[in-house]
Each structure stands twice: as structure tokens, then as C-alpha cells.
Amino acid sequence: MKMVYSPRHHGHSGHVELYNGQILPAFEKPERAEMIRAAVEARGFGPTIGPSAHGLDPVARVHSPAYVRFLSTLTELWIADGRPFPILPSFWRAPGMRRLEPETVDGKLGHYSFDAGCCFVPGTWDAIQSSVDVALTGADLIRAGEASAYALCRPPGHHAHDETMGGYCYINNAAVAAQALLDSGAARVAILDVDYHHGNGTQAIFYDRADVLVCNIHADPKQEFPYFLGHADETGSGAGEGFNANYPLPWGTGFAAWSAALDDACRRIEAYGPDVLLVSLGVDTFKDDPISQFRLDSPDYFAIGSRIAKLGRPTLFVQEGGYAVEAIGVNVANTLEGFLQG
Ligand code: OKP
Ligand code: ZN
């Protein structure tokens, strides 16, 4: 299995987030990707390759042109205003307010985000582009006939909607890769999101479509971020009815209950019969994750990979979250090894 990785993720560093009323270094930091890369390379699954540049056209198949323009021009607008870095949104619309794009940069920041989880430093936009190129290059490998590939995306993507960033996510890497596969001949794609947090962006992007089955196993939004999406009764709308499945689980969930949800999701995927499977691979389900409340242990990730392998589909793993820096490399590598051993 090849790994796609870009050192350009380092541009997104030194950024911050709001935590307990304080501005602190972000949990989503460059060391994450380096720990994962080292652990995966140490297992010798296959070569590490760099991404090829795909430009913004495949991004625009999922995200609105105005949103992509906002992301790509934010840093220059900020500099033109003579403002200091980092950039962090802190104004949002309440229900009932109007959906008009403000002219000034602070207003635009609120318009295009849903939380203060998406900080910008001068290298952030380049890192975002490299991350989606990593996912698209992974999709290219699958299209070229590889049985599987691993896209070490950073920043992650699954919280990003068509025109909204949030939860450390700017461009929805998995959604863009899925759409690229559909655009190049796949008839049906399934996305299995095993990150601890609900992939609200991925769900919303494909909610009314039958050509992408989205299955999410995650902490119950009644208790956990993203709080406002991810309930079990969200099953799709219109043509997409029946093509979204949520498995919300309570804080404290261990592998017995978690793997029962995985098994159910896998049965659904099997019945759907996708041409390609994308796995939004977050390992923040780990017992020692600093911002999460599930109790999976490192050996459990072998079992996850092995269950996914039983689907027998061309499979692209796309990195999402995981913040226990000392363990995330092992947990990702265990998932991939479990998959490769079948
Ligand atoms: C991203 B991924 C904001 C803290 C809220 C956001 C969690 C984002 C997780 N100051 N937490 O799904 O791992
Ligand atoms: Zn997460």
C-alpha cells in the first residue's frame, strides 16, 4: 500500500484554538502527521510518494467558487488590512439573520465558518492545497488499479461543508476525492467515517445524493462536537434518502459497542456495492485521546482494518483526526496493517 504525503502540511503550524476560555496551541499540530508518517513507514507497507498538483477544479466540484475564493484570498486580504496573525473567526450569524456575504474580512470569516476551530497562519492555505492534493493523488492510485492507498492528509477535512470551514477542517478532502472518483467513472462510492467526531461536512455535502453512501460512527452529538448534526434519524433526503447512516455512541464507548456499529455499517456498505470505498480515518477514538471520550485501545485498530478489508473493495484511507500524538502513528499503522492482512 502506497502512502501519499506532503511536507507542505508544515505551513499550517504555530496556530491556535480557543480552549477553556484561553487561546492555546492547536491540538491539530504538525507533529501529528510526522508521527503517523514515521510509524507507517516503519511497517514497510510500500513507498511514500508526494502528491501531484490537481489545481482547484476538483475542489470546485464540492465547494462553492465564492468559498474557494475566500480561502485562497483570506491571507492577502488580512495582510492588506495590516492585521497581525494568526487569523481566528469569532463572529457568526444566529438563525434568523441574513445569509449575505459581508465585504470586510472579519465578516467574511464568520460567514464562511461555524466555529473558532479554523485558524489561519501565512502557510495555512498552501497546506490546505497540499492536503487535498494528497487525497486526490490517493484517488488517482485507486483509479489506476491499486487495491488500496493511504492519503496522509493534514489539515483534516470531514467537518468542512460546501461553503463552511470548522473543526480544524477547510476543504473536505474525502468528499473531493469521492467526487473525483465519480467524475472519472465510478458509479457509486461509499464513505465510512470512523473518526470520533461526526463528519458533518461529508454528510451534508452528499445528503441528497444516492451515488455516495455515507456511514458515520461517532460520539453522540447530544454530548460532543459538532453538536448540531450526526443524529441517528438523519438518513438522507430526496434521492439520497437511505444513503446516510449515523451511529452515534455515548461517551465512554469501548470496542465491543464500537465494533458492533462498525459491523452494521459494513453490512450496509456491502449491500450498497460501491465501486470504491473511502475511509475517513480518525484515530481519536483512542482511550488516551486528549479531546475525546471513547476507549479504543491500540490492538483494536488491527480489527478495524481487518473488518474493512472483508468488504473486498478498492479502498482509499484518508486521514482525519487523532490527537494523542504518541499513539496516533501506531493506531493508524495498526489499522492499515489489519487491512493488509485481511
Ligand atoms: C476534528 B476532527 C474548538 C475545540 C472544539 C473541535 C474538534 C475538532 C475535531 N476550540 N473541538 O474530527 O478530529
Ligand atoms: Zn475527530
Image (tube, rainbow, N blue to C red):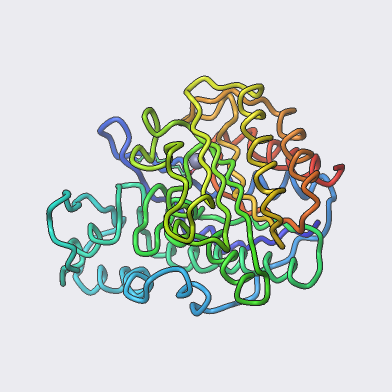
Of the 4 image quadrants, the one containing the C terminus is top right
Residue found at the far left of this picture: 97
Question: Where's residue 334, x and y in %?
Answer: 75, 38
Determine which quarter of the picture holds residue 339: top right
Count the marks: 0
Question: Where's residue 319, x and y in %?
Answer: 60, 51
Question: Where's residue 233, x and y in %?
Answer: 43, 39
Residue at 77% x, 47% y is 311
Residue at 70% x, 71% y is 140
Q: Is residue 195 above or below residue 250?
A: below
Viewer-proximal residue among 215 and 279: 215
Viewer-proximal residue among 118 and 252: 252
Please indicate whether residue 105 sits to the left or right of residue 225 in the image. left
Q: Is residue 197 above or below residue 148?
A: above
Question: Where's residue 299, x and y in %?
Answer: 75, 28
Of the 4 image quadrants, the one containing the N terminus is bottom right
Determine which quarter of the picture holds residue 79: bottom left
Please indicate whether residue 315 sits to the left or right of residue 258 in the image. right
Please indicate whether residue 197 sits to the left or right of residue 153 in the image. left
Residue at 58% x, 77% y is 54
Taking the image in four quarters, ligand 1 sits in the one at: top left
Residue at 64% x, 70% y is 181
Please indicate whether residue 94 sits to the left or right of residue 333 in the image. left
Q: Is residue 194 above or below residue 179?
A: above
